[in-house]
Amino acid sequence: MGFAPRWFRACWGPNLVSRPAAPDTIPSMSLPGPPSHPHGHLHTHPHHLGEIDASLYLHPQTLARLSSFELRAKLIIEGLSSGLHRSPFQGFSVEFAQHRPYTAGDDLRHLDWKVFARTDKLQIKQYQQETNLDLVVLVDSSGSMNYGSRSFADASGSGREVSLDGRPMWTKFDHATALAAALAYITLRQGDRVGLTIFADQVRATLKRSSGQSAWRPIVAALATHPDQTPGGETRGSRLRRCFDQILSSLTNRCVLALVSDLFHDLDDLKEALARVRHAGHDLIAFQVLDRAEVEFPFDQAAPFVGLEGEPEVRVDPRALREAYLKVMSEHLTQVQRTLRAFGFDSQTVSTHDWLGPSVAAFVARRNAQLKRSKYG
Amino acid sequence: MPFLHPILAFVGLSCVALPILIHILMRRRRRPIVWGAMRFIELALAQQRKRTRLEQLLLLGARCLAVALVTVALARPLLEASSASPRGPRTLYLVIDNGVATSATTGGPGSTSEFDALRTQAEGLLSALDAGRGDRVALVTTASPVETVVLPPSPDVALVTQLVHALKPQDSRTDLVSALAAVRQSLASAPAPGVASLTPRSEVAILSPWRLGSADLKAALQPLSSKPGDEELTLVSTPPVSEPLTNIAITDAAALRPLLLAGSDSDSTTPVRVGLRRSGPGVSQPAVTTVRVSIRALTSTATLPASVPLLVHWEPGQETAWATATVPIPANAGEHAPPLAIVASADADAIAADNTFIRPLTTRDQLRVAIVGTLALTPPRTPDQFTPGDWLGLALAPSASAVDLKRTEIAVTPLDAATLTPAALAGFDAAFVTRPDLVAPEGLRALRALLDASGLVVLAPPPVAASPTWADGFERALGVTLSLAPSPKELSPASTPKPPASADRTLLAPLASELAELCKPVTVSRVLTPQAAELQPLLLLADGSPLLALATPGEARGTVAYLAAAIDLNWTTLPAMPLMVPVTQELLRQGVGRSAGLWTQAAGAPVVPGATDLRPLSVDGLITSTAAARSGTTPVFRSRGLWTATDRAGARLGILSINADPAGSRAEVQARPVIEAALAPLGPKVTWLDGVRSAPTGPGAAEPRPLDNADRTLDLLLLAGALAMVLAETLLSRLFSHARPGDLMPTSALPTGSTPTPAASAQEAA
């Protein structure tokens, strides 16, 4: 394994170096210039997007790892053109859906003669019309997403010591940025459209859906230049139901929503938001981004804790509190997963200390396999 | 609970606050942690708050208890917890009588004195104290003025033992009242009892032979404690001595004329009056006491003159006696010769300190007298032309002439009253002011300077009509109160002066026998009478008002005399009568010598004002003086001796002689009931220390016994408890630290998400 370059090991981890991607499959990560905004709805920091190096968040190896996967819609999607995904508009396409009795005026080309031969009844074959997928990545930018205990240099893999705004730590929002870029890349590669919404207490920024092959770059740029949340500055929590109301009101067709958040929300708020998504007929994939320190609570010295969302300072003895904290955290995570399952949505917990490629690839593969099993029995 | 080491217990219990202080100090040293998942910390805190607080309290309690147990165990608690227990800390107030009476010896020279017995008793009491237990001791000696050697009480028993060992009987009288007042003040200012186990019991031990000179039992004593029936206070005392002793003390030895004039051919001898007082059982017996009187130079190399033996015959029951001896004066006496002193020594008896009396003599080559009045341009030819200065010049120096003025005993110099200055009056021994109405403020300052230098100022009203307001200036300047009448009073018929009843004890005592006869031809027709009550009359008028009186200045050392009639024939015939010469001569000699007499005092008496520097003067074979003790800036004399008093410039002011106080050397024994009755106002009943013991026998004064097995068991239990508490603290801190490695919840253990099947979704939704 000594021949593997550092960026390769950093991106894929030591277990995957035995199957490196071919160099010719690695797309170029440099942005040639300011990205185009065909829909003109990007409300982000006025940072020059052309200066953003996308490799800060998504390494080419990650893209290569994900290039062979397809993200399939679990629910029926209302697309504008033919694609990979099922559409609620039943037609006479490739995939059989059901029979219905013949009525006068029906096209005789769709008559199932085999059924007529067996049952002496005229039945018309109906097919499931396949459509394209609209993926809307919803990235939580609330204050709690700005926590990180991993160094930026370790997580980025680009050799840069600090982020664009000078942070030395790799936050959950940075990880969400990388995840959004990866999802956008997968989606664009299979010809589907992808959009972006950044929200906290309300929708902060939106990128309209696009199917352009380089449409993932504006997504990375928008996320990388999104205003940071600092403890001393203006704080904002996350109001999921309100944000989803705003998001859903702007969606005119059924989409797949990729929610990237730490999901440190109130469970009732989460349930109401998910119910709205479900009622609107959208599919949702929840990526719960967590930092290792948040789930292990490795502190051992009494110290004051300052919240990132304007909470008052609390003096804590971590050793005494750790057991209760882990219990509360575990219960919350379990409740979140249970809630998501109850609504039939997939979810994936992502740790900022883990490499992104394997976890996303495993999730997509597992989801596709599940879809295949449910489809064919 | 009493402790063997209460101070250690107190300090150790104070250390219980250390864990709390450490906890508070450690809180301030952490940097804040910025945290995202605060809602889970708040939720966890809400669940853990009670438990965490309980854990912290348990841990803090264990730490404090461990410290407390360790310190209590080291302080050696005692099982007998009663406050009346004899095993608690004690405070011993040691009141030792070291007055002159305690120097009495029952045997011959070299035998132990009664003070030695008291010191042995005190050392025994001190040996019973235990500084480690918290015992403290105060030491007060009763020789006047009372010395609080160690007060407030000190835990350094060893140091007090050394101080007691170094104590010696003094020559002043015993002042038990002041000593007990100091003890009472210390008891009242003692800290209020807080912890019962730390409240010391107080014990006042009066060590005295209780002879009559040691205790003035007629004085009213005040209660020692402000709390009636205070059980924490005990009173013990040595029993009164029972051996009868007869003591004879020399109370005084004074020359008839304290001022010696070296130029006087007739003064080769001088009468010396010696006073004695005897006490003890021998008073009832006739006796003869031999007193040797001499006047000698206070130098070790001087040739000792022959002393004059003086036999004093005592009648049965006679306690005091006076005798006069004619003592030769050394030939080389003078201002520039070594100082002279009268030395009277009696036979050896029980108390040796009062067998010798020393009184320094003031010697002058010549008395210099200034007559402050008007200077006549021409000498008077007839008596009716004589001024007061002329009359005084004739009276003071009747045989003087301008030629042999320097050879006379008294040199008279007329000075102008209006131009009197301190420089003009410097070097004079006395000043007769005949025209006080003419004296300017500068002249008043000059007269005050003369008084400060132990001089004599004689005032007389002016012979002419003048406003009596001049008296106000004199009273302010000289510090005397005369209260003169506003105007002269005419006496009709003229009054004849007479000596007062106590003429033999006044300045005119040398004339006492013939004074009445000399007064008869004198008449006084006009006087300016003083009305002040504190004047000492030397001559009285028929109506009892003073014709000649002494006034004592408040601060100065000199003497002021006031003659109520002007020295003028229109006022009185005194200037032309024979009384004028002896009266003015004795007034001058005795007045100047009176100031010198102030330098002889009894031990313990207040020091003569004005003495700025005192150096001990030791004379071989006579007396050995030591440096005077000091109470603040004031020198204190408790033992006899001689000191040379000088002023700031180094000029010798005089010889200070301190003799034993004869009032304190009375040797009569007193009975126990009398003493008990006298000590009853103190409060606690006195317990007698019969015999020399190492501890008193009174209630609450038992000898401290060593730690018994129960105490040692308690110590072991406390140590074991402290050890257990340390172990418990270790376990609790380990337990409450929650530092168990299995608690970590790795990320892999978290739910990683799922792809729910429709059946599972339905089940979850249900």
Image: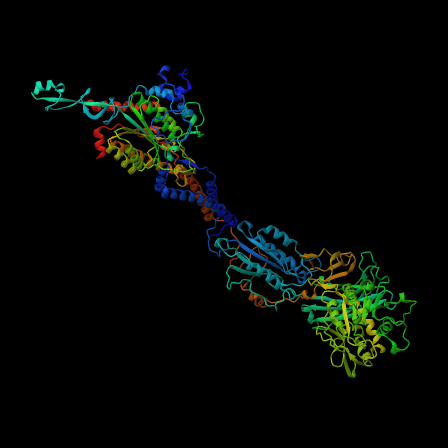
Residue located at (91% from left, 69% from top) = B401
Residue located at (74% from left, 57% from top) = B614
- Report whether residue B606 is seen: yes
For the residue pair B677 and A136, the one nearer the viewer reads as A136
Relative to residue B717, is residue A261 drawn left or right?
A: left
Q: Residue furthest bottom?
A: B493
Q: Residue furthest right?
A: B403
Q: Position of residue B146 (x, y in %)?
A: 64, 60
For the residue pair B589 and A102, the one nearer the viewer reads as A102
Q: Is residue B372 above or below residue A287?
A: below
Q: Is residue B162 above or below residue A199?
A: below
For the residue pair B762 and A205, the one nearer the viewer reads as A205
Q: How is the image coloured?
A: rainbow
Q: Position of residue B55 (x, y in %)?
A: 39, 42
Relative to residue A296, is residue B463 drawn left or right?
A: right
Q: Is residue B158 above or below residue B570?
A: above
Q: Position of residue A193 (x, y in %)?
A: 30, 24
Location of the C terminus of chain B by quadrant is top left
Total number of numbered discs in the rendering: 0
- Report whether residue A352 is seen: no
For the residue pair B150 and B234, the one nearer the viewer reads as B150
Q: Position of residue B651 (x, y in %)?
A: 79, 57
Residue B53 falls in image quadrant: top left
Q: Is residue B534 above or below residue B347?
A: below
